Image (cartoon, rainbow, N blue to C red):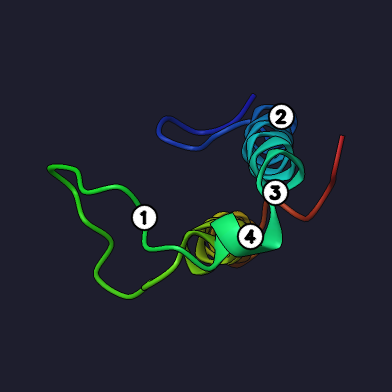
Amino acid sequence: MLPKGLIDPGQLRNELVMVQTACDEKLLALSGEQLDLAPEPSHLNHPIAATKYEVLSWMFKHDAWHCAEMELIKLNLGLGFKWQ
């Protein structure tokens, strides 16, 4: 059993796959010309990305960063590293 506040590695992996799948679907649905367009305006405009491609690329990297960050925290707590 994981200490309170830690996410089960299986759940974390499932969430990573969910984000990757959503990004893959968007990438496959958009043409190269569409990927070069600016993202649609929203109440949460992206602070870094200027194109749809950059937004999707950032999402992949951002999610992977957090997965690695959580695993590092678990290693530092002596809980080990294990993908389920």
Residue holding disc 1? 39
Tell me if 43 is positioned left or right of 12 in this view: left
Tell me if 1 is positioned left or right of 17 in this view: left
How dense is the environment of label 3, judged by Cα within 10 Å: few (below 14), some, or many (20 and up)? some
Residue in the image at 73% along x and 35% along y: 21
Single out the mark in the foreground, 1 or 4: 1
Q: Amino acid at mark 4?
A: Ala
Q: Earlier in the sequence, mark 1 or mark 4?
A: 1
Q: Nearer the viewer, residue 80 or 22?
A: 22
Residue holding disc 2? 14
- Disc 3 to disc 4, C-alpha distance: 17 Å
The percent coordinates of residue 27 (x first, y second) are: 70, 48
**Tally of marks:** 4
- Disc 1 to disc 3, C-alpha distance: 13 Å
- Disc 2 to disc 3, C-alpha distance: 20 Å
At numbered mark 1, what does the secondary structure look like: helix, strand or loop?
loop
Tell me if 52 is positioned left or right of 31 in this view: left
Q: Which quadrant is home to the C terminus? A: top right
Q: Which quadrant is home to the N terminus? A: top right
Residue holding disc 3? 27
- Disc 2 to disc 1, C-alpha distance: 27 Å
Q: Amino acid at mark 1?
A: Pro
Residue in the image at 30% along x and 47% along y: 40
Q: Amino acid at mark 3?
A: Leu
Single out the mark in the foreground, 2 or 1: 1
Single out the mark in the foreground, 3 or 4: 3
Tell me if 71 is positioned left or right of 55 in this view: right
Residue in the image at 66% along x and 27% along y: 11
The percent coordinates of residue 15 (x first, y second) are: 63, 33
At numbered mark 3, what does the secondary structure look like: helix, strand or loop?
helix
Q: Amino acid at mark 2?
A: Asn
